[in-house]
Image: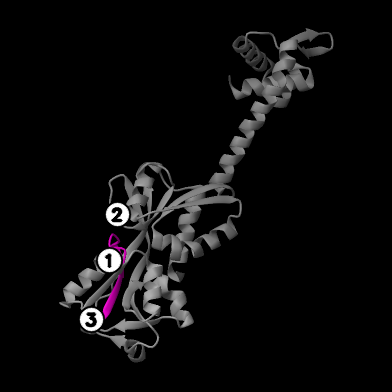
C-alpha cells in the first residue's frame, strides 16, 4: 500500500471528484484512477460509488477513511521528525561516557548543547572506557566518550587531552613552595584511585621512569574520595586537572608544579561506529560543539 494511493483516495473523498483531485495532486486523471483501482484491489473492496453528483464514499470507503487519515498524519510526522533530527532541532542523543568524563567534562559541554538544542533529549550512560566501547559496538549509543581504545569497527575523534596534576592540602610544605620534584614525592603518602583506570597506569609509569620508590600508598576506588583524603592532609595525589579545578579555585586544594616530570596526559576521544557513515544532524552538532568547547574545558 503506497502513500500516493492513500493520498489520492483522501483527496477524491475530500473533493468528490477524480478530475479535481488529480488537478490538486498535479497528476493526470488516468494516473489517479489507476492508483484508486490499485488501492481497491489491495483492500479487496470498492471505496467509491460514482453518482450524478460525483464520487461518493462507499461503506468500505467510509470505514477506511479515518485509518487512511491517521496513516498519512503518521507518515508526515515521521518525515518531520527526520527533518528535525537532520537539522538537530529535535530528537534524541544517546551517549556513553567514562566516569571522569561524565563527572567533570560532560556537564559543561551538555549545558551549552541543551541551550542551543533545547528540544533534543539527551541520555547518558556511564561505565569504564572498555564498557563505553562495547556500548558503541553494540549500537546502544550514538557516541562514546572515554580514553582512546582501538577497534577496527570504531573511529576515534580526539577532542581533549586530560592532564594529571599534583595536588596537596593547602597547609602542605609543597603548597608553600609551589613546586616539587618526583624524588620528593617518594617520601609522601601517595593517594591513588581506581586501579583499573589508565590514570593509575600513567602514574605508576611516571614513578618507574623517574626511579622513585614510594614510601606509602593509599588506594581508593574513585576520584572524589581521593580528593577528600588529600584535603584532610592524609597524602598527596596526582589527579585529573578537570577533577580538581573547583577545589583549587576555592582554595580547598593546592596545585603543585612537578619540576622534573614529563606531562602526564591521556587523550579523551569520541568513539563512533565506522559503519554509521559521516556524522549528521544531532550527532554532527554535538561533535562540533565538543571540538569547540575542548579548549575551554
Element at badge 3? helix
The foreground one among 45 and 111 is 111
Q: Is residue 33 visible?
A: yes
Q: Are the residues tagged 3 and 2 within 8 Å (C-beta)?
A: no
Circle 1 is placed at which residue position? Answer: 200
| Circle number at residue 149 | 2
Judge whether residue 191 is colored magenta: yes
Where is residue 290? Give x, y as percent.
Answer: 46, 60
Element at badge 1? helix
**Circle 3 or circle 2, nearest the eye:** 3
Q: In terms of image quadrants, where is residue 170?
A: bottom left
Residue range corresponding to the magenta coloring:
186-199
Element at badge 2? loop
* Residue located 63% across and 14% down the image: 39
* Residue located 59% across and 35% down the image: 78
Circle 3 is placed at which residue position? Answer: 182
Amino acid at each position: 500500500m503506497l502513500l500516493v494511493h492513500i493520498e489520492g483516495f483522501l483527496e477524491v473523498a475530500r473533493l468528490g471528484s477524480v478530475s479535481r483531485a488529480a488537478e490538486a495532486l498535479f497528476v493526470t486523471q488516468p494516473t489517479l484512477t489507476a492508483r484508486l483501482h490499485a488501492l481497491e484491489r489491495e483492500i479487496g473492496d470498492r471505496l467509491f460509488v460514482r453518482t450524478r453528483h460525483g464520487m461518493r464514499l462507499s461503506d468500505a470507503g467510509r470505514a477506511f477513511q479515518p485509518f487512511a487519515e491517521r496513516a498519512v498524519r503518521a507518515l508526515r510526522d515521521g518525515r518531520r521528525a527526520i527533518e528535525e533530527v537532520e537539522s538537530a532541532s529535535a530528537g534524541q542523543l544517546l551517549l556513553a561516557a567514562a566516569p571522569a568524563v561524565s563527572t567533570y567534562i560532560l556537564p559543561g559541554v551538555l549545558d551549552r548543547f541543551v541551550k542551543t538544542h533545547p528540544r533534543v533529549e539527551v541520555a547518558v550512560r556511564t561505565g569504564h572506557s572498555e564498557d563505553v566501547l562495547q556500548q558503541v559496538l553494540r549500537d546502544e549509543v550514538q557516541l562514546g566518550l572515554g580514553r582512546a581504545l582501538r577497534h577496527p569497527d570504531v573511529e576515534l575523534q580526539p577532542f581533549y587531552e586530560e592532564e594529571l596534576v599534583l595536588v596537596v592540602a593547602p597547609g602542605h610544605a609543597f603548597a608553600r613552595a609551589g613546586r616539587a620534584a618526583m624524588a620528593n614525592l617518594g617520601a609522601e603518602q601517595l593517594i591513588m584511585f581506581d586501579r583499573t583506570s589508565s590514570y593509575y597506569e600513567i602514574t605508576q609509569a611516571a614513578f618507574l621512569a623517574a626511579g622513585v620508590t614510594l614510601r606509602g600508598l593509599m588506594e581508593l576506588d574513585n576520584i572524589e574520595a581521593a580528593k577528600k583524603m588529600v584535603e584532610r592532609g592524609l597524602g598527596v595525589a596526582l589527579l585529573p586537572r578537570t577533577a580538581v579545578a573547583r577545589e583549587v579555585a576555592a582554595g580547598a586544594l593546592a596545585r603543585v608544579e612537578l619540576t622534573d616530570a614529563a606531562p602526564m596526559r591521556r587523550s579523551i576521544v569520541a568513539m563512533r561506529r565506522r559503519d554509521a557513515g559521516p556524522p549528521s544532524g544531532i550527532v554532527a552538532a554535538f561533535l562540533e560543539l565538543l571540538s569547540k568547547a575542548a579548549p575551554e574545558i
